[in-house]
Image (cartoon, rainbow, N blue to C red):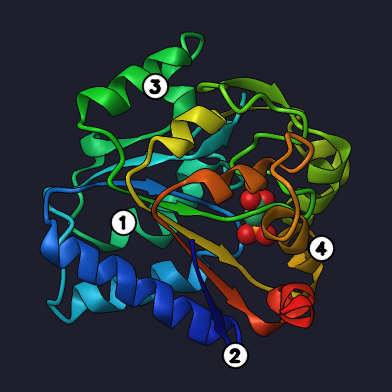
C-alpha cells in the first residue's frame, strides 16, 4: 500500500486525476470502478478538463459505479446516476450503454458481479471512505466475503448524507452496493480521503488490525492500493509516524 499525503483537497484531486488519466492513456479500453460523494468531485472535473484538451478519451471505457440508492429514479437529482451524468458522463465521450450501476440489476444484484466479470474485471477502482469506515455502502459489520447486494444504510451514513437532501427524512434507507469481495477483486484501487472528519476513519483503517468493524481496513490486504489523503485526513496517521 502506497500512502501519498497532499497539502490540500485541490492537490489531492490533481494527483488522483493525473494517475487516472495516465492509466486511461495506457489502457484506453479499461474498466473503471467509480465512486460518488463529495470527495471525487474535483477529480472528475479535472478529468473532464483533460478530456476537453484532447489528452484522454473514454470512448472505449466501461464503468461500474460502487453504489446507488434504492428507489430513486435515475433522473432524481439525488441519485448517483444523476450525479455521474451531470458531473462526468454528459461531458465526455463515454457510451452510456457502457456505464453500469448496481440498482440496474435489481432484484438480482449478484448479476452485477457477473457483469463485472464478463467485462474482464475492474482494472482501476476509485474509492472513498465514510466517517464510519464504510467503503461503497458496506457499513461496519459487513462480511469481507460480501458480493453486490441490497443493504440498509446505518444511522451514521444517513446523517452524513443528509447534507445532500432537503431533510434527513428524505435520505433513502436502502441502497445497492458492490460487496467488499467485489471491491477487493479490482486490480488496482485509488483511495481518496479529504478533511478532518475522515482522520479517525483513516487511522482506524490503516493503523489498526483488519476488522469488519472498519470495512476499509480490509484494503491493507489488497496488493495494489494507492491511498491519497490531504493533510487533514492524514493528521492522525502522520502523528503516529
Ligand atoms: P464523501 O463520501 O466523499 O461524500 O465524504 C464518501 C463515502 O461515504 O464513501
Q: Can residue 121 be seen in this view?
A: yes
Query: For the residue carrying disc 4, how many other residues have a C-alpha within 10 Å: few (<14), some (14-19), or many (20+)?
Result: some
Residue at numbered disc 2: 7
Local SS, label 4: helix
Residue 6 locus on image (x, y percent): 55, 85
The mark that comes first in sequence, 4 or 3, is 3
The answer to whether residue 153 is above or below residue 13 is above
The mark that comes first in sequence, 2 or 4, is 2
Spatial CA distance of label 1 from label 3 is 23 Å
Local SS, label 3: helix
Residue at numbered disc 4: 200
Q: 220 or 138, which lies in front?
A: 220
Residue 108 locus on image (x, y percent): 46, 9
The mark that comes first in sequence, 3 or 2, is 2
Report whether 110 appears left or right of 175: left
Residue at numbered disc 3: 112
Name the quadrant of the C terminus.
Answer: bottom right
Residue at numbered disc 1: 90
Local SS, label 1: helix
Nearer the observer, disc 3 or disc 2? Answer: 2
Amino acid at each position: 500500500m502506497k500512502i501519498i499525503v497532499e497539502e490540500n483537497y485541490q492537490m489531492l484531486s490533481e494527483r488522483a486525476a493525473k494517475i487516472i488519466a495516465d492509466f486511461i492513456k495506457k489502457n484506453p479500453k479499461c474498466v473503471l470502478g467509480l465512486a460518488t460523494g463529495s470527495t471525487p468531485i474535483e477529480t472528475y472535473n479535472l478529468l473532464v478538463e483533460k478530456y476537453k484538451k484532447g489528452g484522454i478519451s473514454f470512448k472505449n471505457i466501461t464503468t461500474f459505479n460502487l453504489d446507488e440508492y434504492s428507489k430513486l429514479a435515475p433522473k432524481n437529482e439525488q441519485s448517483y446516476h444523476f450525479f455521474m451524468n451531470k458531473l462526468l458522463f454528459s461531458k465526455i465521450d463515454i457510451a452510456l450503454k457502457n456505464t453500469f450501476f448496481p440498482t440496474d440489476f435489481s432484484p438480482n444484484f449478484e448479476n452485477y458481479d457477473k457483469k463485472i466479470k464478463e467485462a474482464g474485471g475492474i482494472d482501476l477502482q476509485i474509492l472513498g471512505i465514510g466517517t464510519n469506515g464504510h467503503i461503497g455502502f458496506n457499513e461496519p459489520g459487513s462480511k469481507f466475503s460480501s458480493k453486490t447486494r441490497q443493504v440498509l444504510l446505518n444511522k451514521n451514513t444517513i446523517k452524513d448524507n443528509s447534507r445532500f437532501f432537503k431533510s434527513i427524512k428524505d435520505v433513502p434507507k436502502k441502497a445497492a452496493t458492490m460487496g467488499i469481495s467485489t471491491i477487493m477483486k479490482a486490480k488496482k484501487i485509488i483511495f481518496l480521503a479529504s478533511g478532518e472528519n475522515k482522520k479517525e476513519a483513516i487511522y482506524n483503517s490503516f493503523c489498526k488490525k483488519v476488522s469488519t468493524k472498519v470495512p476499509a481496513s480490509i484494503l491493507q490486504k489488497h496488493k495494489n492500493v494507492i491511498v491519497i489523503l490531504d493533510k487533514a485526513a492524514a493528521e492522525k496517521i502522520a502523528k503516529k509516524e
